[in-house]
Amino acid sequence: MRDISLARMIDLTRIADPRGNLTFLQNGSAELPFDIRRVFYIYDVPAGATRGGHAHYRGEELLVAISGSFDVLLDDSATKKRFTLNRPYQALYIPAGLWREMDNFSSGSVCLTLSSEPYSEDDYIRDYDEYCKYQLS
Ligand code: TYD
């Protein structure tokens, strides 16, 4: 059973500057729970759309609302928890094995995802019933 309590918000380094703020992530820093092996981002999300709808066997992820806001609904098949991401200096850590959906994307929002794994469809569980069975295994 992969437990939802392992998910958490992480405060990233924020270098405040009158010229504009700056946040960085680099492998090896204490705030990163894993080494980054892949980056992708979701943008131009139409109003009302839902993304995600899957779990990963191995992949750990950090999600950041680089611009705008969206919600992430996490589910371990026993408990659900909703996080609102709306700060470029905060990341949601999603350990392996949690079901996730993203919705409530604001206009112009961008969801940056940092992953511990290269892309592999073999790492996805895309069927919720199958996920619930996996959680019982
Ligand atoms: P999908 O998993 O449906 O996106 P999300 O869960 O974020 O809503 O991915 C959409 C498509 O993009 C799907 O065909 C797989 C492909 N894809 C890649 O080729 N590489 C990647 O790193 C990711 C995340 C997706």
Image (cartoon, helix red, strand yellow):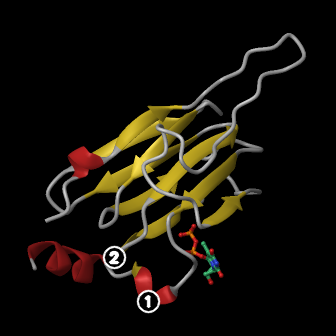
| The quadrant where residue 69 appears | top right
Q: Looking at the rendered structure, which numbered label has been put on residue 100?
A: none
Tag 1's secondary structure? helix
Q: CA distance from mark 1 to mark 2?
A: 9 Å
| Numbered circles on residues, count | 2
**Quarter of the rendering occupied by the C terminus:** bottom left
Whether the residue carrying mark 1 lies under 8 Å from ligand 1 is answered with no
Tag 2's secondary structure? loop
Q: Amino acid at mark 1?
A: Asp
**Badge 1 density bin: few <14, some 14–19, many ≥20, Cα 10 Å:** few
Residue at (30%, 67%) from the top-left corner?
Answer: 97
| The quadrant where residue 58 appears | bottom left
Give the residue at mark 2: 57
In the rendered structure, the answer to whether residue 21 lies left or right of residue 111 reads: right
**Residue 46 against residue 67 in the figure, above or below:** below
| Quadrant of the image where one finds ligand 1 | bottom right
